[in-house]
Amino acid sequence: MADPHQLFDDTSSAQSQGYGAQRGPSSLGYPAASTSPQAAFLDDPVSNMAMAYGSSLAAQGKELVDKNIDRFIPITKLKYYFAVDTLYVGKKLGLLFFPYLHQDWEVQYQQDTPVAPRFDVNAPDLYIPAMAFITYVLVAGLALGTQDRFSPDLLGLQASSALAWLTLEVLAILLSLYLVTVNTDLTTIDLVAFLGYKYVGSGRCG
């Protein structure tokens, strides 16, 4: 069984090996050139120094951007909620449509850390709510079109209204939990995920 802490499958090594095998000079049937302008450029110490300096600046810039983004948007945490696969999506949709057939609702943990959604159908995710929300907005636009009332402004208003109601629902639940002093491991993103599942039924009914 795969490691539950591994969010996504790592295929970079296999792709890089295949790419190297396909792009090699011998595989193309051409002899390797002894000297080329590119090779002469790379042999220049000044060029090597400039390339090393540019790579260092790029690495520092990427680190700075990642650090600032994580301060406002928890990218690392969001990756967990999108770690899904086709099998998980099928099981989750079956669970949402037929919840009365499901018995075990406990989220699985390993070393005090919840496993990735693709390993546990009970784990919350954001992939299905995001796709369901988009489908809900598109179906609403289709319904407006059948009534000859469609316009891009109304479609944007529908999406904004749905997001506003979702935000109010999250705030209401957080306020309720605070007032009744309930200790829970649910995060705000978990609440967004669970509340977003309602769009699955709305899109289907629409």
Image (spheres, rainbow, N blue to C red):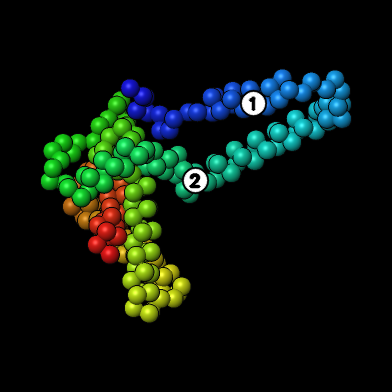
Which residue position is annotated with label 2?
71
Q: Do labels 1 and 2 touch, CB within 8 Å?
A: no
- Image-based side of 7 in relation to 88, left or right: right
| Residue density around tag 2, few if under 14, some if 14–19, many if 20 or more, within 10 Å | few
Q: Nearer the viewer, mark 1 or mark 2?
A: 1
| Residue depicted at 86% across the width and 27% down the height | 36
Quarter in which the C terminus is drawn: bottom left
| Residue density around tag 1, few if under 14, some if 14–19, many if 20 or more, within 10 Å | few
- Quadrant housing residue 117: top left
CA–CA distance between discs 1 and 2? 41 Å
| Residue 22's disc number | 1
Q: Secondary structure at mark 2?
A: helix
| Residue depicted at 16% across the width and 46% down the height | 99
Q: Amino acid at mark 1?
A: Gln
Quarter in which the N terminus is drawn: top left
Q: Earlier in the sequence, mark 1 or mark 2?
A: 1
| Residue depicted at 13% across the width and 42% down the height | 101
> Can residue 191 be seen in the rendering of this structure?
no
- Image-based side of 31 in relation to 22, left or right: right
Q: Amino acid at mark 2?
A: Arg
- Image-based side of 45 in relation to 90, left or right: right
- The location of residue 159, given as percent across then percent down, is 39, 66
> Can residue 29 be seen in the rendering of this structure?
yes
